[in-house]
Amino acid sequence: MKKVALLIALISTVLLSSACNTSPVQSNTSQPLHTTDKQEGGKVSNDDAANSPDKETDMAASRNDQQEIETSDSESQPENTSMDISATDSLIRSPEGKNLSQVEWTPGAPDVSLPMKFGKTKAELVIGLDHPNGTKAIVYFPSSSVGWSLDMSGADNSEAFEDYGDLQEGYKMQATLHDFDQDGINELIVAVGNSLIDECIWVYSFTTVGDLRKINPINQELSIAGQAYIVLNGKELMAPYGSQGLFDSYKYVDKQFMQPVY
């Protein structure tokens, strides 16, 4: 009997010891990913978070982005440098007849935008319906949270716009960037037309100003009329007219457009 009692006591001791060493079941309850207090129990301190690999990667990326902003003096082009539209529908073409438009908007379509960068200044061209009526073409500067409407005067002889400023059906508005004088800062070209006999072209330059919220940095450099399209060739802009292969030529010289006399 004593041997049996001793054996039972020994078995109980082994079972109790095994139960104490068993890991608890993991909870399915979601836990916070980060904590800010350094305590025992697995919470991460601010110092530990700052030294984590992910944090170091984020800081390195931030430094690289800042360096790109500070050292880049050249123009930043959108990834898609031209739209997939036919040459016959293009309002802005190369001498070879290829489409150069980077953005297009037609009446009734959603707003479209063209990312831009003038030197170190980021901007965005937004084209679409204005409210309560009319057509908007605004250059927005995210750094200052301000937008300036483009000066589209000089299109009085065109039938592109209705009395209230709405773009007529059958017309479209296209835009592109082009560095006429190769100074590293692009000029903005906007064209409105029907790809037949009526087109208006505007060219805008950017000027560095002290306060983007008070001074409009976008200046209209050229406003002309054409027929079907314009041609960009280096410093020269050509607007064909008539059916005999004639065109008006405008060259960008000393920060202004001049019409050569032949």
Image (spheres, rainbow, N blue to C red):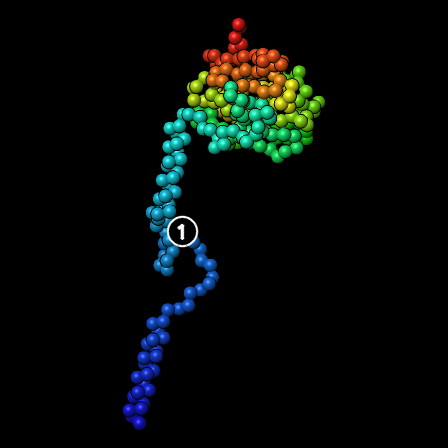
Residue at 37 percent across and 58 percent down: it is 42
- Residue 219 visible in this rendered orientation of the protein: no
Relative depth, front residue between 101 and 108: 101
Q: Amino acid at mark 1?
A: Thr
In the depicted structure, whether residue 200 falls above or below residue 70? above
Q: Is residue 195 left or right of residue 35?
A: right
Relative depth, front residue between 26 and 97: 97
In the depicted structure, whether residue 9 falls above or below residue 253? below
For the image, the number of numbered tags is: 1
Residue at 30 percent across and 87 percent down: it is 7
Q: Which quadrant is the N terminus positioned in?
A: bottom left
Position of residue 259 measured from the top left corner of the image (x, y, whole percent): 53, 9
User: In the rendered image, which residue does mark 1 sit on?
Assistant: 36
Relative depth, front residue between 46 and 146: 146
Residue that protrudes farthest toward the right in the picture: 163
Position of residue 206 measured from the top left corner of the image (x, y, whole percent): 49, 21
Residue at 38 percent across and 56 percent down: it is 43
In the depicted structure, whether residue 26 falls above or below residue 12? above
The quarter holding residue 152 reads: top right
Indicate the secondary structure of the residue bearing disc 1: loop
Residue that protrudes farthest toward the top in the picture: 262
The quarter holding residue 192 reads: top right
Position of residue 133 measured from the top left corner of the image (x, y, whole percent): 68, 29
Residue at 35 percent across and 44 percent down: it is 56
Relative depth, front residue between 116 and 36: 116
Position of residue 262 measured from the top left corner of the image (x, y, whole percent): 53, 5
Q: Is residue 125 left or right of residue 162?
A: left
